[in-house]
Amino acid sequence: MEKDFKMTAVTMAGLEGVLADELRQLGAMEVKEGIRSVAFRGDKGFMYKANIALRTAIRILKPIKRSKIYDEEDLYEAIQRVKWERLW
C-alpha cells in the first residue's frame, strides 16, 4: 500500500467547512480548514477518489517539493532543483 501524503483541496470562500465535512465523510485523515482550502492526508488512491467525489473542491493539489523560501532568489533556486523529468 502506498504511503500517505499531505494534499490540499482548493475551494471558494465560505465553503471550507462544507469541503472539510465532505473530506471527513470520504475518509480523509488530518483534515484542517484554511482560507479557501482544506489540507488533508491520504494515499494516491484517496487522491483519485477525492477528485471524483468532492462536489465543493475546485482542484486537489499534491506537493512535489518542500523548500524554505525567503526571497525571489530562493524560489528560483528551489524550482531549478526540482527533477521535473521524474514527474512526467
Image (cartoon, rainbow, N blue to C red):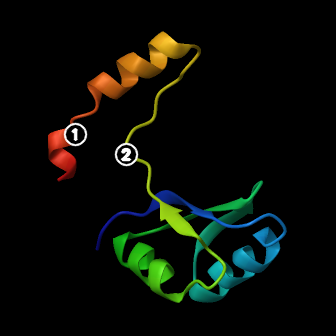
The residue singled out by tag 2 in the image is: 64
At 38% from the left and 23% from the top, the residue drawn is 78
Relative to 49, residue 87 above or below:
above
At 30% from the left and 68% from the top, the residue drawn is 2
At 22% from the left and 50% from the top, the residue drawn is 87
| Quarter of the image where one finds residue 5 | bottom left
Residue type (three-letter) at the residue carrying disc 2: Ile
- For disc 2, the neighbor class at 10 Å (few under 14, some 14 to 19, many from 20) is few
At 71% from the left and 76% from the top, the residue drawn is 19
Q: Earlier in the sequence, mark 2 or mark 1?
A: 2
Left or right of 32, for residue 7: left
Q: Which type of secondary structure does the marked residue at label 1 adopt?
A: helix
Choose between 29 and 13: the one closer to the eye: 13
Choose between 75 and 30: the one closer to the eye: 75
The residue singled out by tag 1 in the image is: 84
Choose between 1 and 83: the one closer to the eye: 83
The x, y position of residue 54, in whole percent, is 58, 83
Relative to 83, residue 29 above or below:
below
- For disc 1, the neighbor class at 10 Å (few under 14, some 14 to 19, many from 20) is few
Q: CA distance from mark 2 to mark 1?
A: 9 Å
Q: Foreground mark, 2 or 1?
A: 1
The x, y position of residue 18, in whole percent, is 77, 79
Relative to 6, residue 83 above or below:
above
Left or right of 50, for residue 87: left
| Quarter of the image where one finds residue 8 | bottom right
The x, y position of residue 75, in whole percent, is 46, 21
Q: Residue 35, labelled with which disc? A: none
Choose between 8 and 27: the one closer to the eye: 8
Residue type (three-letter) at the residue carrying disc 1: Trp
| Quarter of the image where one finds residue 23 | bottom right
